[in-house]
Image: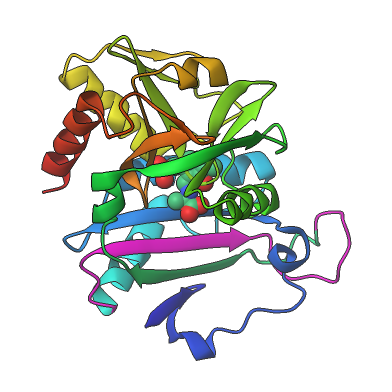
C-alpha cells in the first residue's frame, strides 16, 4: 500500500511525520475523503473546491495546484490498483515547536494521502440503520473539513455504545447533520435537509442527492427542521461519501414511517446506482 507523502510515493513504513506536526498537536489541518468507483475519483471537482475553501478559511497554503493534486491522487490510485474504495487526503500546517501562533512562514504544509480498499455498504443501504439523537456541541464552522473531529468522534461512539448505527446531531432541537454524513427526511413526499450554511459540512453526496431529486421531480427544501418533524416523517436517510444513501429506520427507539426503507429513498438509491455505473 503506497502512500503519498508530500510529492513522493512511499510505503507506509517510510512515511515519517514529525511529532511537532501541528495536525498532531492542534488538529491544525484540513482533509478530504473521496470515493473511488471503477478506479475513478467520484465528483473530484466538488472535493477540490471544498478543500480549497477549507484551506483558505483556516489559512493553510495548499502545497500544490488543484491540477497537480489531482495528478497525484490519480497516480496514487493507479499505483495501488484501487478499483473500489476511498482516498483519504490531509494537509496540516506543518511541523514547528508547539505554540499557538502560526509557525514561521518557511514552515511547509504536510500533505499525506492513502487509498482504502473498501466495498460499498450494500447491506446497510438495503436494510437501513438505526440512529439516536444528540446535542451538536461542535464549533460554528462545521462547513470547514478540518481535522478537529473530537465532537464527531464522541457522538459517534455514544451512538455505537447505545447499539445505534449513527448519531443525528441537533442544536436546540433543530437537526443539523450526522457525525460523518448529512441528514435528510421525506415529509408528505417532499425532501428536507439543513441549508448549506456554517452549521453543516456541505456534503458532495448531499449535492449529488439534491441533483438526483431535481431530475426525479422530487420537491426538495434546504430548510431547517426539528426532531419532532423527523419523528413524524415518512422516511429518513443519511448521505455521505462512505455511506452513499443509507436509510434510517428508527430514531431514539422510535420507528420512522413503516420502520423500513421508504419508496423515495429507494428511488434516490437507484438513481445514485445508475450514476456511478
Ligand atoms: N465525512 N457531514 C460530516 C460531518 C462529514 O464528516 C461528512 C463526510 C459528510 C458528508 O460529506 P460528503 O458527502 O462530502 O462525504 C457530512 C467523511 C466521509 C469522513 O470524515 O470520513
Residue 53 is left or right of residue 126, and the answer is right
Q: In the figure, residue 237 lies in which quadrant?
A: top left
Which residue is at the far bottom?
A: 13
Residue 12 is left or right of residue 143, and the answer is left
Q: Nearer the viewer, residue 63 or 23?
A: 23
| 272 within the magenta span | no
Is the stretch drawn in magenta largely helix, strand or loop? Answer: loop
Residue 106 is left or right of residue 184, and the answer is right
Work out whether residue 51 can be spotted. no
Up the image or down, 68 lies above or below 112; here it is: above
Residue 87 is left or right of residue 142, and the answer is left
Image location of residue 118, percent across then percent down? 31, 67
Residue at (68% x, 60% y) in the render: 93
Residue at (35% x, 57% y) in the render: 70
Q: In the figure, residue 83 lies in which quadrant?
A: bottom left
Image location of residue 69, percent across then percent down? 40, 59
Up the image or down, 116 lies above or below 182; here it is: below
| 96 within the magenta span | yes
Number of numbered discs present? 0
Task: State the scheme by which the image is colored.
Answer: rainbow
Residue at (38% x, 81% y) in the render: 2
Q: Quadrant of the N terminus?
A: bottom left
Residue at (54% x, 84% y) in the render: 15
Q: Which residues are magenta?
A: 80-102
Q: Nearer the viewer, residue 158 or 203?
A: 158
Up the image or down, 255 lies above or below 88; here it is: above
Image location of residue 178, percent across then percent down? 52, 39
Work out whether residue 227 can be spotted. yes
Q: In the figure, residue 197 lies in which quadrant?
A: top right
Image location of residue 13, percent across then percent down? 51, 90
Amino acid at each position: 500500500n503506497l502512500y503519498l507523502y508530500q510529492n513522493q510515493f512511499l510505503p507506509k513504513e517510510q512515511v515519517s511525520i514529525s511529532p511537532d506536526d501541528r495536525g498532531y498537536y492542534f488538529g491544525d489541518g484540513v482533509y478530504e475523503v473521496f470515493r473511488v468507483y471503477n478506479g475513478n475519483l467520484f465528483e473530484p471537482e466538488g472535493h477540490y473546491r471544498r478543500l480549497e475553501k477549507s484551506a483558505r478559511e483556516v489559512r493553510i497554503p495548499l502545497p500544490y495546484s488543484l491540477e497537480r493534486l489531482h495528478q497525484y491522487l490519480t497516480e496514487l490510485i493507479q499505483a495501488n490498483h484501487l478499483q473500489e474504495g476511498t482516498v483519504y487526503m490531509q494537509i496540516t500546517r506543518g511541523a514547528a515547536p508547539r505554540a499557538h501562533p502560526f509557525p514561521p512562514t518557511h514552515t511547509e504544509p504536510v500533505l499525506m494521502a492513502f487509498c482504502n480498499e473498501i466495498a460499498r455498504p450494500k447491506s446497510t443501504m438495503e436494510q437501513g440503520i438505526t440512529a439516536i439523537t444528540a446535542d451538536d456541541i461542535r464549533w460554528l464552522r462545521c462547513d470547514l473539513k478540518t481535522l478537529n473531529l473530537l465532537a464527531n468522534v464522541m457522538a459517534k461512539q455514544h451512538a455505537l455504545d447505545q447499539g445505534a448505527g449513527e448519531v443525528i446531531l441537533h442544536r436546540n432541537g433543530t437537526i443539523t447533520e450526522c457525525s460523518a454524513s448529512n441528514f435528510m427526511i421525506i415529509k408528505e413526499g417532499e425532501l428536507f435537509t439543513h441549508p448549506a450554511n456554517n452549521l453543516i459540512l456541505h456534503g458532495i453526496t448531499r449535492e449529488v442527492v439534491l441533483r438526483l431529486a431535481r431530475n426525479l421531480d422530487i420537491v426538495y427544501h434546504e430548510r431547517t427542521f426539528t426532531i419532532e418533524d423527523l419523528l413524524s416523517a415518512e422516511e429518513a436517510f443519511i448521505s455521505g461519501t462512505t455511506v452513499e444513501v443509507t436509510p434510517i429506520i428508527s430514531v431514539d427507539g422510535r420507528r420512522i414511517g413503516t420502520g423500513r426503507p421508504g419508496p423515495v429513498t429507494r428511488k434516490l438509491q437507484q438513481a445514485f446506482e445508475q450514476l456511478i455505473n
